[in-house]
Image (cartoon, rainbow, N blue to C red):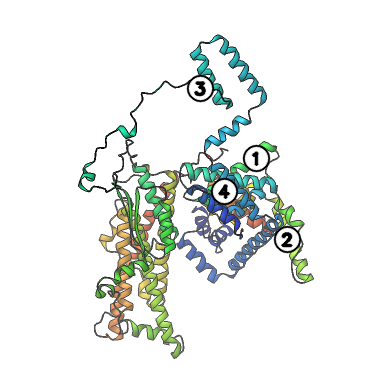
Amino acid sequence: MFSNWRRWRLSGERHTPDEDLLLFLDNEVTSWRAARIRRHLDLCWTCRVRMEKLQQAIHDYVAVRSQAAAAGGEDSTRLQMEFDRRLAAREKPPAAGLRRLRFRMPAAAWASAAIAAIALGATQSVSGRAALGRVFSAVTGWAAKPEPAPPRPAFPPVAAVPHVASTKEAAHPGAVPVDVAPIPSVVPERAITRREIENAKIEILYTLHRTGACLRYPLEVAAGAREGLQVRGVLENAEQKERVIATGRGREWIRFDVVTEAEAIERQRGRSVAAAADGEVVHGSAPAVQPLLVRYFRARVRLEDAGPLIVRFSNDSLDRAATLREHAWALRRLAENFPESASFDAIDRAHAWLLEEMMTDHMGELRGNIASLQRKLSEVFPSVAEPIAADPKDGERPRSWQDAVRLALAAAETIERATRQCFASTGGGQPDAETAEAELARSFAPVAARINVLQALVERGFDMHNALRRKPAPMFGAPDSPKR
Amino acid sequence: MWRGGEPRARACDLQSEAARAASRHFEERHAAVLRYLFCVCGNHADAEELTQEAFLRLYVEIRDRHEPPNVQAWIFRVAHNLAIDHLRSQSDAGLAVTLGGMAEEIADAADSAEQQIVERERRQRVRQALAWLSPQQRQCLELRAEGLRYREIGDVLGIQISSVRTFIVRAVARIAGRTDV
């Protein structure tokens, strides 16, 4: 994977290879590499033209292909109706299939069966003949009369049986007992295996991941040894809720207590107004680094344009900081669901593939957001980009990938907190520009160090990812898939 | 894509949850699977039959086990394997490459005569390039055009992701008129 990239870097060539450009177009490179290619494309006209040629080739291929497909003239309605008809035929009980099979039996088989029955019937005993007759009638459907059943002992007529009132009837004469207790099943319920629970957990987490609900929405997936799986929390909309619940369809041991944001607000409305209004604190005063921002933007743009640019810069920085924290939270959720004690052997390989994909996605986003935040802030505050000696305690190596994720989350929260402190007023007095700049440098020092540590931690995560890839996990092991 | 009302009503008549799910997946994905199978088989009737068979297998999978986590990749893999088996049973002629020939018979839809000429030449160049592609390069391109990720393509075709990358890069470079990749 890294060979081309490494070759490119070591060879001293200044242009991005075609392969990397195409992978970049297909979003098949990691976020940090994509950011590097994007930076290169910003500067290099040659590579940009080559990339446009590749895009044009894809465009030509898609155009030819879509024309060929249109020429095929598929009739979707007819195909759908045909498929539904076949499905309906497959849904019928197997007995009907056997009946059809019986009438398709060739004439020679019928004759052979009849001759064999007659020949055997002449030599066998009466009971043997009866048994053969039953088999023959079962195969042919002919009306061979079965042996009459032995007479049952005669029961007394219903009217002759004296009525004995139950205790309920005695207590409430005339009342009809309707609440009959269900008959306890003699078949014990099937025990849910740990593998089933772990697989279902991954499927639910993957559904959250695909619907984008793995970020910023609290949802807990708890597994118990006896209780099965419990999913509870808040999702953004009804579609996400429906898709998450659909994941557990057919598995009664998964219980859902999931509400949408609107439903949660509706629930909250019934409670105290103060609790419902407990939202984010809005600061009215200007951010601490406002003088620095003003100085920076006024030096570059017209006076009337500086204000909107400062607002956009602040919001963008805060958004990026919040996004990287959300991805770190999503990784932590994965780590919580699969603690150190859990083994990958307890998961189907197809599900390990899903877990791997989720981790890769979040790690890539985390890395990309850190790089983009650092790049953005360094435009205005060069001190952010300066190398800063890492704190010795930051050099501690995590014991496991779960441990690494926890440290990554702590670092991501530090970054976000520091960014907020820069761009949101803390409510104190307004410092002058020099003081603000000094505070800014101090506040970003740990952030910059944390970014380095976080990158190392994410790389550690990629090591785990690559270790997983050494055992290639097929996506599925469908028994119906024809073997090649 | 199907837009009528009657088949939906029929799908609702299906009794089991598995059948309804299979019908829904068929509605969403059959066009893509059909396109791919047509590319591999080169015959519309065979492609339609194999499409139906692939989705019936999806129904059996959902009914007997559970819905695959990645239905799109699953159905493409089953469809691909069915197509390979079908072609082997038909003859040992190898995989068909049909797209270039099909597009040749289609009338141009460009506005002006100049545009028509330019478009025709461009398409001719693409068709010539496609004729040089190996079956695996074509299959990789087709699956990528259907929206599959490289890893999924590798799983469908049973090849490494690095091979998928190589096939796609060389195929696109060939179409772009470059032969030095």
Q: Which residue is mark 2?
A: B123
Q: Which residue is mark 1?
A: B86
Q: Residue at x 24, y 45 (%)?
A: A169
Say yes or no: labels 3 and 4 on the same chain.
no
Disc with the residue nearer the chain's start (2 vs 1) = 1
Chain to which the residue tagged by mark 1 belongs: B
Q: Which residue is mark 4?
A: B76
Q: Nearer the viewer, residue B67 or A93?
A: A93
Q: Disc 1 marks which amino acid? A: His
Q: Nearer the viewer, residue A266 or A227?
A: A266
Give x and y (percent) for residue A57: 65, 61
Say what secondary structure mark 1 lies in: helix
Q: Label 3 vs label 1: CA separation?
A: 48 Å
Disc with the residue nearer the chain's start (4 vs 2) = 4
Disc with the residue nearer the chain's start (4 vs 1) = 4
Q: Are marks 3 and 1 in contact (CB under 8 Å)?
A: no
Q: Disc 3 marks which amino acid? A: Pro
Q: Nearer the viewer, residue A66 or A150?
A: A150
Q: Disc 4 marks which amino acid? A: Phe
Q: Are marks 4 and 1 in contact (CB under 8 Å)?
A: no
Give x and y (percent) for residue A189: 33, 40
Tell me where residue A49 sits by quadrant. bottom right
Q: Label 4 vs label 2: CA separation?
A: 27 Å
Say what secondary structure mark 4 lies in: helix
Q: With respect to residue A106, does B23 lie above or below? A: below
Q: Label 3 vs label 2: CA separation?
A: 75 Å
Q: Label 4 vs label 1: CA separation?
A: 15 Å
Say what secondary structure mark 2 lies in: helix
Chain to which the residue tagged by mark 2 belongs: B
Q: Which residue is mark 3?
A: A146
